[in-house]
Every structure is written in C-alpha cells, then in structure tokens.
Amino acid sequence: MTRFVALPYRHWIALSLARALQADDHQVGGRGADALLARARQCLGDEAKPWLLPLCQELAAWPEPVWRSLSVRMLADRLQTMAPFVDGMDPSLHERPQVRRLLLRPSRQLPPPFALEGLTLPHLPTEAHLADWLGLSIEELDWLAGDAYRYREASPTARRPWVEPSRHYQCLLLPKRRGGLRLIEAPLPRLKAAQRRILSDLLSRVPVHEAAHGFVTGRRVATHAATHAGQAFVASLDLKDFFPSIGRARIEALFHTLGFTEAVAARLTALCTTRTPAMVRDRLRSDGSLSHQDARRLASAHLPQGAPTSPALANLCAFGLDLRLDGLAHRFGARYSRYADDLVWSGPAPLARDWRTLQAWATGVIEDEGFRLRHDKTRRMPAAGRQRITGVVVNERPNLPREAYDQLRAELHRLGAQGPVDPGLRAPIVGRIAWATQFVVPSRADKLRRMFQAIDFGTMPAPNAAAASAASTASPVDPALHLNGKPSG
C-alpha cells in the first residue's frame, strides 16, 4: 500500500517551476534568462507575471557548476528562498499562480562534488540503468530493494499493517569474549552479489579520509599502529555500535552527494541497509546485550555488520568525523587515526596534560556527528607503561605482544604434535600467522612458519612461507580480524 502526501501549495509551484527550468537547460543557451523565462511561462501560463523576469535573470547569473549540482528538489528549495519567488507568492502583490503545464526533463545523474570531478562512477541515471548494471530485472530489483523496505515496522495491533518486506539477511548471534552476544547480519547470496558489485565498481572508487586505516586498500592495522609508534603519550576512544549508528538518511545523502538521482540513491540505500527483525532484537534485549535505544536503532534501516558494503560506507559516512578530529589533533600538536571504531591520538609528553581538554572537545564532535562513545573503553597510555592499540604494542615500534606470540607458538606446537588436523583449520591459522609475522622479528616469523609446515592437514598440501606472506596482502582487511575489526589474538 502506498500513501500519497499532498504537497503545500507553495512547494508544488516551486517544484513544477523547477522541473520546467531544468527541462532544456543542457541545450546551448538553455540557461539564458530568455530561455528560462520562456519555459517558466509555459509552466505557469502566458499571463503577465512580472516577478518571473527578475527570477530568471537571477538564475541565469548562477555559474554552471552551481546550476549542474542542483537536483529538481534542491532547485525547488532554493526557489522558495529567492526574493522574486517570495513576492510572486504574496497574494497582496500578485495573482495566485497556477500550474498550466508540466514540463518534464529526462532523469539525469549529476556530476560528483567539487574536488571529486575525476571520479569514474557508473552512469546510473534511472532505476532501469541500476538494475541492468547489477545484472537484475526490474522485478528482481523490487524484490531486493522495493518500496516495502521504506515502510516502518508493522504493529501487531495495526488494522492495516504495512507490507512486510522479504528477508535477505541471516542473523547470527555470536558470543563476545567479555560476555553478551554480537549480532552479525549476513546477506544471502543474491543480495551479497549485488553488494559486491556496488563495493568494487562504485564505493571503492571514492576516497576516504587519510586518517581512516580500517578496510581501506593499502592501509591496515600495521599502518594504523605505525602512526603512533614511539610517542610519549597515546590515548584511545571507542565508538559504540559503529555500523548500526549509521542510518538510512546519512547513506542516502552520501549517494545523492555523489550525483545519483533521488530514486537511484534510494534503491542503492535499500540494497545496503536492513532492519533487524523484532524476534532478534528481543533475544538481544533478554540477554542484556541491547538497551532500549540500541533496539530502536536496529529497528530502523541501518548498516548491517556482515555486509560487504558496510565498512566502505561507514568510512565514507565518517569522513566529516575524521576531518574534524584530525583538525582537533593538529590543534593540540597530536596525531590522529581511526581503525573502524577505534579512535587513537598520540603525541609528545604535554599531550598527557591536555588530554582531558582534547577528550572533551572530541566527545562533542563525536556526538555532533551522530556517533556515541563506549566510555568503559577509554584508555590513557603513557610511555612508561604498555601502549597497545588494536592488539599491537607501539611503545617503540609496532610489535606483537609477547603473550600473543607465545599463545600462537604453543597452539602451533600442539597441532604439530597431535597428528592429522582438520583441514578446515588451515585457513584461519594461515591468517593468524600472516597477522603475527607483520609485527615480529624475522627469526620469530621463520620459526612460526616452520612450526606451521610441521602440521599434518591430511591430504591438503601445506603452504610455503610465500603463501602465508601473500595472505597478509591479498585483502585490505587483515585476515586475523573478527568481523568488528578487532584482532583475534
């Protein structure tokens, strides 16, 4: 069922006029005052409307980049703030205008914003183009991301409930190391294939802030840790529910900023977000893993932890956060970087004295950007103690903690001595070794590889050192990470 909301009269006139003004604006001379006035009179009738001429003259003076960056709705909003339009809508000054004819223009994709003009993004002016780009029919696109995904959750007592969308995610509840349950929302194969296309051919082409190191090609935990190695003072904050904190409106605004039409941006957003079913939220609340406010976030459209597109979208939506926190760090003579939901600052000894002030400013920025902090995970780490971020010690240089190295070595020794080992364990162990060898001296790295080669994985051949090394660079995401971006060690 679809509900139609009547537009206010003033907005209806502005929207109709905006469509007419943009109908042929791509033609030679189409943005001149005379051409704009001719289309405006076609829309509102040929009767004398003296306020149209100054309005069109003002529009014709706009530079081309400004004009090209406006969608129909954005232009309509701008029209309602312009003095000639305001005067034209005043019944004491002019006769009430009426729409005589609707002039429609073909749907078109806007150029990327300033400083991103060089991006090569897919040309998707309509929903039909989007479906074809994803290898789907329009019916399949509706099934994956139709209007039903914009509806609010149906109330059990509602007389006319909303249409219930199909479920395209598998919800997994995994135990946390510190107690409680972690929600993983994994897309089913059909949707996952579409999300991988969006990630590889669209999102991966948009640059993120230099301070973001998680899930970015060419950056990883090692580069994040190296940023803060050898500093006199290190401090970290942790964001709460990083992915669910990013909702539909922010993601849709991102796609629209990249130039996609409102219809295509809405479809892309629906493909990349989900609403957690009520039974799953109830299970999390009964376990104590979810507050009432957190449950409300999951009930609305949000980034699912487990979708291929979520890390890239989270980094792009956090661009403003990174930009402001990086500027704040510069103001205090510090360094800043972020790995997923871990925010880290480091600097000389005076930073320890100024940390409370910096933290207060950072908290205000974080909340203003729509995120929340986990106050139980705030840490201050002077050089006199162990400085550890994302599982790596950074007192002098990025280094694996001794207990983590000993634990991995003991496990490899046990597996090597017990005889045939389940081949399914091979890939996780390769990942853990690749992770560890980034932060240990070459002699220890060689020792771990030799111990791995001594393990009997049945009929599967053991990898050589090059294979383990390649595993650490095959993906921008470190292979030994949990799905929330934390090291498994």
Image (cartoon, helix red, strand yellow):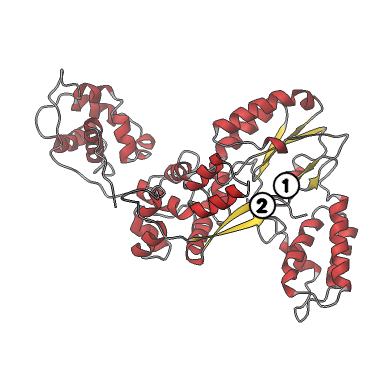
Where is 334 relative to 206, above or below?
above
Give how far across and how far down residue 359 sits, in percent: 69, 28
Q: Residue at x 72, y 25 (%)?
A: 356
Residue 34: horizontal and vertical position, in percent? 19, 33
Q: Does label 2 or label 1 sit earlier along the sequence?
A: 2
Image quadrant in which you'd find residue 413:
bottom right
Q: Residues within 10 Å of mark 1 (few under 14, many from 20)?
A: some
Q: Quadrant of residue 37?
A: top left
Rendered location of residue 437, percent (x, y): 81, 58
Give the residue drawn at x 41%, y 61%: 133
363 horizontally vs 104: left or right: right
The percent coordinates of residue 28 (x first, y second) are 26, 42
Q: Nearer the viewer, residue 471 or 352?
A: 352
Kindly state the secondary structure of the residue where label 1 is placed.
Answer: helix
Mark 2 and mark 1 residues within 8 Å of each other at the beta carbon? yes
Decide: is 35 above or below 94.
Answer: below
* Type of the residue with mark 2: Gly
Q: Identify the disc placed on residue 218.
A: 2
Q: Quadrant of residue 17?
A: top left
Q: What residue is drawn where x is 51% and y is 43%?
A: 297
Crowd rating for badge 2 (residues with CA inside 10 Å; few <14, some 14–19, many 20+): few
Q: For mark 1, what is the residue?
A: 223
Circle 1: residue type: Thr
